[in-house]
Amino acid sequence: MAEEIRKPPFDPKRKLMGARPGPGAAGPAGRGRFKKPFARRRVCRFCVDKMAYIDFKNVNLLRNFISDRGKMLSSRTTGVCATHQRGLRTAIKRARNVAMLPFSVV
Ligand SMILES: [Zn+2]
């Protein structure tokens, strides 16, 4: 009659949500065994600065959100919220079209 409480062997969604410390994250049997080498603070820079519009001409700002190969960084990496990630996407695309940012590097 003993019902086993079985955990799924691997849930990829857990990994995606890993940066958020949920309840019981610091528990004894929690997932505290692997710590990321560097933890970024998950705050959206644009929300902090209360920017409603991301200017595509502000290339120095946009360069923080593309990799050195010219690709956009994910919001998981940068901590940008979903609203501002959409604005950032538009701004980067516009900046590429006027040749202020590269589409790709090498
Ligand atoms: Zn934001």
Image: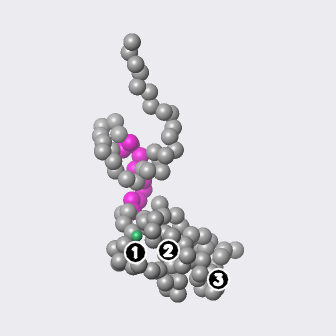
Q: Residue at x 33, y 48 (%)?
A: 22
Ligand 1 is within 8 Å of the C-beta of the residue at disc 1: yes
The N terminus lies in which quarter of the figure?
Answer: top left
Q: Position of residue 94 (x, y in %)?
A: 59, 81
Q: Residue at x 64, y 85 (%)?
A: 99
What residue would you read off at disc 3?
A: 97
What residue would you read off at disc 2?
A: 87
Q: Residue at x 38, y 63 (%)?
A: 42
The circle drawn on residue 9 is none
Residue 34 located left or right of residue 12: left
What segment is highlighted magenta in the picture?
A: 31-40
Which mark sits nearer the N-terminus, 1 or 3?
A: 1
On screen, residue 38 above or below 63? above
What residue would you read off at disc 1?
A: 46
Q: Residues under labels 2 and 3: Cα distance? A: 16 Å
Residue 71: image quadrant is bottom right
Q: Is residue 48 magenta?
A: no
